[in-house]
Amino acid sequence: MLRDLLDALRCPRPHDESWLVAMVQRAEGAELLDADLACPVCGAEFVIHEGIARFDPPVAPAPAMAVEAVRLAALLGVTEGQQPVLLAGVYADAGAALAELVPVPQLWLNARRTAPRPATLVGALEVRGRVPLGVETLAGAALDGAHSDGPMLDSVVRAVRRGGRLVAPAAALLPAGVQTVAHDAHELVADVTTRASGLVELRRRAPDQVG
């Protein structure tokens, strides 16, 4: 996991959104290999081990399916930029092929350990519930059937920037603020149309303004 991705991580526990504090144990250049993560609000602790941020025992990917990188690139609608796209479960299997077409950063969620890793991979998460990412930290996301219900879907939608694309199973129940633009019998494509609230920016007031 790249150090820069730490700024996007949030505590997944049910309280006001909070950054995580990191104690780095092992790194190679810009890549974090082992670190301890802690929430300053609730005290929850997590780890980065061998470059993977582990928040929960991972959800098993949906049954294997053929994912065409060209089609996935078209559905996500992302051609460039610094924000990563999230590839969950079986979609990560197409990550290496997608990177050859679209050189945008990738963030994997509960990916198979055998999936080929592209140079554009900036991090990997293992999560069972809410995805621990801040508001508008993703350019888009592709979720398989194992990652498209309840709190996980809601948290991914919060993390996708306004105007970003979501690819999900056709049967997924989308939350408010998402509009379906296309679908077939297996997948839907939706635009995120609103911005969720996130961290409150604190501003220091001048001394004569206090009181």
Image (cartoon, grey):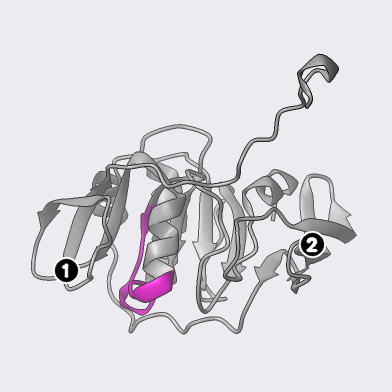
Examine the rendered structure and indicate whether residue 210 appears above or below residue 21: above
Residue 135 placed where, x, y %?
50, 47
Residue 166 placed where, x, y %?
30, 54
The residue most toward the front is: 211
Q: Which class describes the residues within 10 Å of circle 2: few (<14), some (14-19), or many (20+)? A: many
- Give 174 or 1, whichever is nearer the viewer: 174
> Start and end of the magenta stretch?
141-151
Image-quadrant location for residue 52: bottom right
The N terminus appears in which quarter of the rendering? bottom right
Reading the image, the residue beneath label 2 is: 33
The disc label shown at residue 85, or none: none
The residue most toward the top is: 208
The disc label shown at residue 170, or none: 1
Residue 177 located left or right of residue 150: left
Q: Nearer the viewer, mark 2 or mark 1?
A: 1
Residue ID at (37%, 66%): 153
